[in-house]
Image (cartoon, rainbow, N blue to C red):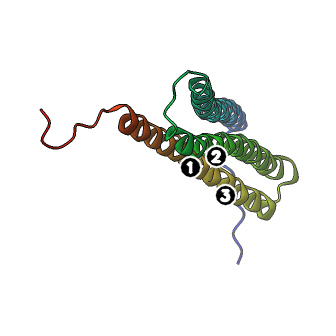
């Protein structure tokens, strides 16, 4: 003997109300997600631009220092290495910008596959690729900062060793 199907205990008005609340929550979550993505992208872009300016500005300052008179010849052997370090910092900063652009592109693909095509496999693939680009952004940031610190450290050491007068032993 089969039992007749149970009637839903939720009234149609309650179902409509719940659906409206769900749609409002989805819209809020979507808007919040878009805003968070925009803020994250802008922050990453500014971070990359800052690294680029710091390394490029340091290289410019070193080149301007070379215009001075009476520069110790020993510095001419060190300064090209410092300029190379700052130049690599600029390069890694440009790589940071590219990585963040690609990261944003693949997150857009993820959103497209999730929302429009409803293709979970493609969405997951896009998010994994986006995560790799974002990790590359972090690596490029670390390398840009290391380049700046290393080049500045070498330059500081060179300037201190050239400028510091050496006192011969036994002299007071």
The spot of residue 129 in percent (x, y) is: 72, 58
First along the sequence among labels 1 and 3: 3
Mark in front: 1 vs 3: 1
Label 3, residues with CA under 10 Å away: few <14, some 14-19, many ≥20: some
Label 2 belongs to which residue?
Answer: 88
Q: Earlier in the sequence, mark 2 or mark 1?
A: 2
Q: Give the quarter of the image for residue 93.
A: top right
Separation (CA) of disc 1 from disc 3: 16 Å
Placement of 18 over or under 102, stated as above or below? above
Which dot, 2 or 3, sits closer to the camera? 2
Which class describes the residues within 10 Å of circle 1: few (<14), some (14-19), or many (20+)? some
C-alpha separation, residue under disc 2 versus residue under disc 1: 9 Å
- What residue sits right under mark 3 in the picture? 132
- What secondary structure is found at the residue carrying circle 1? helix
* Whether label 2 touches label 1, CB < 8 Å: yes
Q: Which residue is mark 1?
A: 143
Q: Nearer the viewer, residue 14 or 56?
A: 56
In this rendering, the answer to whether 35 lies above or below 98 is: above
CB-based contact (under 8 Å), mark 2 and mark 3: no
Location of the C terminus (image quadrant): top left
Task: Pick the residue in front: 127 or 137.
Answer: 137
Asked whether, in this view, residue 111 is left or right of residue 91, the answer is right
Image point (69%, 69%), residue name: 3
Nearer to us in this view, 35 or 87:
87
Residue, x 74% and y 47% (percent of image)?
A: 107
> Which quadrant holds residue 37?
top right
Marks 1/3 in contact by CB < 8 Å: the verdict is no
């Amino acid at each position: 003997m089969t039992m007749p199907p149970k009637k839903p205990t939720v009234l149609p008005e309650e179902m409509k109300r719940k659906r409206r609340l769900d749609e409002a929550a989805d819209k809020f979550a979507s808007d919040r997600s878009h805003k968070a993505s925009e803020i994250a992208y802008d922050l990453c872009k500014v971070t990359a631009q800052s690294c680029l300016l710091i390394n490029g500005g340091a290289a410019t300052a070193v080149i301007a220092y070379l215009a001075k008179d009476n520069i110790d010849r020993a510095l001419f052997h060190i300064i090209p290495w410092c300029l190379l370090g700052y130049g690599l910092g600029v390069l890694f900063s440009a790589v940071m910008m590219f990585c963040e652009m690609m990261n944003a592109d693949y997150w857009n693909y993820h959103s497209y596959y999730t929302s429009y095509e409803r293709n979970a496999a493609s969405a997951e693939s896009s998010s994994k690729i986006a995560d790799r680009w974002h990790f590359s952004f972090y690596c490029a940031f670390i390398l840009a900062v290391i380049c700046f610190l290393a080049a500045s450290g070498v330059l500081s050491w060179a300037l201190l060793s050239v400028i510091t007068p050496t006192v011969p032993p036994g002299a007071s």
